[in-house]
Amino acid sequence: MRALLQIAFRNLLAHRERGLLLLIVLAGASAVLVGVMSVSAGVARAQREAVRTFLAGDLNVGGYFKEHPDSIFPVVGDTSRVRSVLQPHVPAECRCASGAGARPPRARDGTGCART
């Protein structure tokens, strides 16, 4: 093994231009690899964030959570307990009168609540 390293070192000293070109190519390939991996990670993060916002919204109080960041489908937790804690804090004009699961029409007034 030592003899092989000596031959390689002598070759680099004898052919400096070729060794320098090899070093530049290796550095460029490493830079391209790091760049592609960072762009890929950024795209995956942005996609997960967009899907999470689309499925659950910015404020999540319904008991939904993700088992894993890459998971698309949320897991529904104990929504009745969360709803019972939050219900007293919701203004009366913002509450849905037609049932727990139904949504009122989205007509906004000055208070920011949806009115039926």
Image: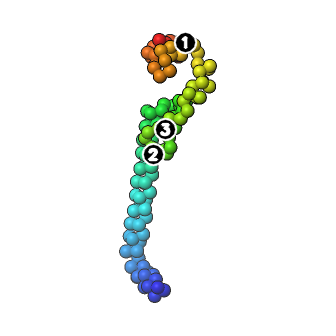
Give residue 112's mark.
Answer: none
Residue 26: quadrant of the picture: bottom left
**Of label 2 and label 3, which has the lower sequence position?**
2
Neighbor class of circle 3 (other Cα within 10 Å; few <14, some 14-19, many 20+) is: few
Q: Position of residue 77 (x, y in %)?
A: 53, 35
Find disc 1 in the rendering and name its residue.
93
**Image height of 13 relative to 72, above or below:** below
Residue type indicated by callout 1:
Glu
Residue 75: mark in rendering: 3
Q: Earlier in the sequence, mark 3 or mark 1?
A: 3
Q: Amino acid at mark 3?
A: Val
Residue 70 got which mark? 2
Residue sitting nearer the eye, 112 or 64: 64
Q: Residue 37: x, y in percent? A: 43, 54
Q: Please name the residue shown 43% across and 33% down the image.
A: 54
Secondary structure under tag 2 reads: loop
